Amino acid sequence: MNTTHTNTRLPTYFISHGGGPWPWMKKEMGDTYARLEASLADMPRQIGRKPRAILMVSAHWEEPAFTVQASPKPPMIYDYGGFPAHTYQVHYNAPGAPDVALRVKQLIEAAGLPAAIDAERGFDHGAFSPMAAIYPEAEVPMVQLSLRRGLDPAEHVALGRALAPLRDEDVLIIGSGLSYHNLRNFGPQAHGVSKAFDDWLDEAVVQGAAADRARQLGQWAAAPSARAAHPREEHLIPLMVAVGAAESEEGVRVYHEDDFMGGLVVSSYRFGAAANA
């Protein structure tokens, strides 16, 4: 991929992607996602320009090797259940970017990590739901990248390090998950455990030294209320990729609620400088 490095380096993000097809359920859900939507919609202003492409690392895709979506026109994957019929007809028609996909695979392999290409994979809701708020016109090409089974934090930080050159090639790296993800304890009763983990997370990725971030995140399971917040960590692991790609740079909390769904404490983060902070 021939790219002229004339742009300033893009930051990376770890965002909440929200529940299922929420952007298409405002009638049913009211203002539940208003603050999240506002934070996502503000990302283009922060970065100051349209990137060449988005590289989206979604919590909803795991493979034996890090696998890159390479379809030029990815289909939709409605990976949710129990929602209104119309939400199984929604479309986010961003084009794919096969050239970016090949570059991603090359970078991963050059770092000694396993990589594969999937030419058929579509967009899951961890990608298309937040992107409906970030770029509602779907004009920016998007490529998804899977997590690797086993969900090793250090390996996903290493993946982020491998992908860091993309930031100088006008590709925006987004990790998509949620800072608290325990669907069996989701509501006001989970305020205490979500706050305990969120406080630790903010200390680890914002307040603490950037150079110590990867070590801290590698020990996330020992954090206060860690397994109460993430019984399974697939919604946290995309954070490791965003951190690895901006390892020594400032972390900033760009979204925070302490009463989401009636009491959950949740946050999203940016790593690296923004054109318009």
Image (cartoon, rainbow, N blue to C red):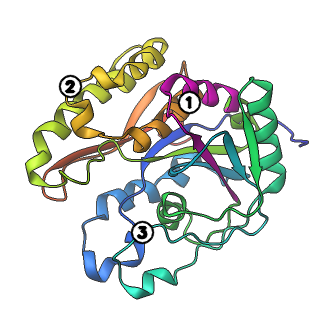
Inspect the image, locate mark 3, and give the three-letter code of the amino acid beneath it: Tyr
Where residue 103 sits: x, y (%)? Answer: 81, 41
- Gap in Å between the C-alphas at discs 1 and 3? 25 Å
Please name whichever residue, 113 or 203, is drawn nearer the observer in this view of the structure.
113
Q: Which residues are magenta?
A: 142-163
Inspect the image, locate mark 2, and give the three-letter code of the amino acid beneath it: Pro
Q: Is residue 150 left or right of residue 97?
A: left
- Gap in Å between the C-alphas at discs 1 and 2? 22 Å
Structural crowding at the residue carrying mark 2, measured as other residues with C-alpha within 10 Å and reported as few (<14), some (14–19) or many (≥20): some
- Gap in Å between the C-alphas at discs 2 and 3? 30 Å
Q: Earlier in the sequence, mark 1 or mark 2?
A: 1
**Residue 153 sits inside the magenta stretch:** yes
Q: Earlier in the sequence, mark 1 or mark 3?
A: 3
Residue matched to label 3: 80
Where residue 72 sits: x, y (%)? Answer: 79, 65
Residue matched to label 1: 156
